[in-house]
Amino acid sequence: VDEFAFGPELEALACDGRIALHCTVTRDEAPGWPGRTGRIDDQLLAAAMPGRDAWCLVCGPAPFVTDVAASLTALGVDPGRIVIER
């Protein structure tokens, strides 16, 4: 988690039970990475989302943010609960 932006802070929030943290490496060449790899998809979002009333914070390149926001909306999340930063 220390290689992710704000990794230690996010891990602390997860340990306190304040957020559900799902770290994913999008590159297949992640030697030693024990977690999930690959593009974030509808299946991962559905599994990670605690409910349709969740606040979803999405940050990344514009195409990624657009795709994830559309997927979250399709899963029933109110667009007003999707916070994006490009």
Image: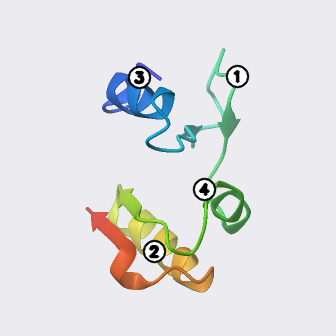
Kind of element beneath mark 4? loop
Mark 3 falls on what kind of element?
loop
For the C terminus, the image quarter is: bottom left
Asked if the residue at tag 3 contacts the one at tag 2, i.e. Cβ–Cβ closer than 8 Å, the answer is: no
- Say which label, 2 or 3, has the lower sequence index: 3
Q: Can you tell which mark lies on residue 34? A: 1
- Rounded to the nearest whole Å, what is the CA distance between mark 4 and mark 3? 18 Å
How far from the left and from the top, in percent, is residue 48? Answer: 64, 54
Which residue type does callout 4 highlight? Ile
What distance separates the C-alpha of mark 4 from that of mark 2?
11 Å
Marker disc for residue 69: 2
Give the answer, above or below, for where 39 lies relative to 77: above
Of label 3 and label 1, which has the lower sequence position? 3
Q: Which is more N-terminal, label 1 or label 2?
A: 1
Residue 40 is tagged as: 4
Residue that lies at the very extreme toward the left in this rendered image: 85
Displayed quadrant of residue 6: top left
Dot 4 or dot 3, earlier in sequence: 3
**First of labels 4, 2 by sequence position:** 4
> Of marks 1 and 4, which one's residue comes earlier in the chain?
1
User: In the image, what residue type sits under mark 3?
Assistant: Glu
Identify the residue position indicated by label 3 in the image: 3
Image spot of residue 70 (x, y percent): 50, 80
Query: Mark 3 Cα within 10 Å, few/some/many (few <14, many 20+)?
Result: few
Image side of residue 23 versus residue 16, left or right: right
The quarter of the picture where residue 4 lies is top left
Q: CA distance from mark 3 to mark 1?
A: 13 Å
Q: Residue at x 60, y 56 (%)?
A: 40
